[in-house]
Amino acid sequence: MTDAPHATGEASRVAAVLVSGGLDSATVLAIARHEGFICHCLTVDYGQRHRVELESAERVATSLGAASHRTVRVDLRAIGGSALTDGIDVPKDRDPDADDVPVTYVPARNTLLLSLLLGLAEVVGANDLFIGANAVDYSGYPDCRPAFLEGFASLASVATVAGSEHGVRYHVHAPLLHLSKAEIIRRGTALGIDYGLTHSCYDPADDGAACGHCDACALRRRGFEAAGVPDPTRYA
Amino acid sequence: MTDAPHATGEASRVAAVLVSGGLDSATVLAIARHEGFICHCLTVDYGQRHRVELESAERVATSLGAASHRTVRVDLRAIGGSALTDGIDVPKDRDPDADDVPVTYVPARNTLLLSLLLGLAEVVGANDLFIGANAVDYSGYPDCRPAFLEGFASLASVATVAGSEHGVRYHVHAPLLHLSKAEIIRRGTALGIDYGLTHSCYDPADDGAACGHCDACALRRRGFEAAGVPDPTRYA
């Protein structure tokens, strides 16, 4: 795993980038574009409630100059285990800094997301994968930690034809890993992102307005305040 | 990765098992059951053509005493890259022992399958994953090799709450890894499997009959011949 630009020359500077429609992954895409990567974007619809986020993903990819954008649907509801995919209520007004693993945890989510991204990377010829994992705000999620991201990059190099037959080394870039939400927002704002295109809320109203009280809204709202940047979010 | 029975006592002998509806994974499930595991089965429908295989998976899970069976749909057609999910013709009457990677290769397939299985394992409390990977008949697939399977087990232990918070070690069991098709068939027959419930063909007729000429049919047909076991497959 590295955040440094890939060094094998212009021809191979192709990246596969996870884009959720949220603030973090929009910032990741802007960073990858800023570093000169041709970016093929993947949105994974794993049966979550907040479908407005999928529409945001398409807008974000287009506005930031992605070379392509695909949405893959994975219906995780058959597996369950999360408030985002089950009927469990999304928690409101809890302390987003609490150490326990929140019920919005999706089993093996980042393993799954990176697996799908790796499939895309093989098809488009990318050996750089970008994900908006963050170890500051999401310390309760084991699959947002450096050991996991480094482990996935190692696995990719033995899992694929490119890696096992042609010696390609994969890199998992997580440029937000050690940034606070305020730092992410300042970075993205400097890169010209219109965060009004993004969506974070776990429990939006029917018209797409953010609830303002779930973990994701709380972190986002505090992030804009701490960054000293006006919050463009439309709250219910 | 190990094929040995798990040693932490009866209470934790719960396994998550991939069942495709084919001959190999039916044998894996029979082996896991024979070793005393309570088996929760997962079938992944990744948009392949041979939907009759999904019906076979349900029959196999039921007939071999699975504790549960779930089907998760992942629509890989948005990513593409394989004759099983694209419009590319399935190759007929090629040498199934050829060293090149066949066009039926699905990008990052086993990484994806194991990711989904890991999610199920977290939900049902299993730390043993079973997959029908085989290094003899499928040497062209990098993600059927021991290095990949061992890599995934290591990744699982840092990817999950169970692994990172509670010290659980995951095991990826691939009991068919070094068996020929004939050996697999003899093993399954000894365990009482009715292979007439299973389906292997990449390109079945509308009524579910096997084509008899794709790689999967050729390997299966030769396997029954070499095992000296009557082939229950219904060919078109």
Image (cartoon, coloured by chain):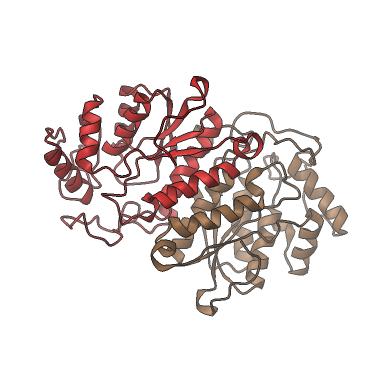
Chain colours: A brown, B red
Q: Quadrant of residue B164?
A: top right
Looking at this view, is A133 or A145 the one in front? A145
- Residue B234 % position (x, y): 15, 36
Where A209 falls versus B41 (above or below)?
A: below
In the visual, does B111 lie left or right of A35?
left
Looking at this view, is A80 or A47 the one in front? A80
Residue B74 seen from this side? no
Q: The N terminus of chain B is located in which quarter?
A: top left
Looking at this view, is B83 or A230 the one in front? B83
- Residue B79 % position (x, y): 44, 56
Residue B54 seen from this side? yes
In the visual, does A147 lie left or right of A179?
left
- The residue drawn where x is 52% and y is 28% is B124
In the visual, does A119 lie left or right of B193?
right
Where A11 falls versus B208 (above or below)?
A: below
Q: The C terminus of chain B is located in which quarter?
A: top left
Where B160 falls versus A191 (above or below)?
A: above
- The residue drawn where x is 15% and y is 32% is B232
Looking at this view, name the residue that lies furthest to the bottom.
Answer: A10
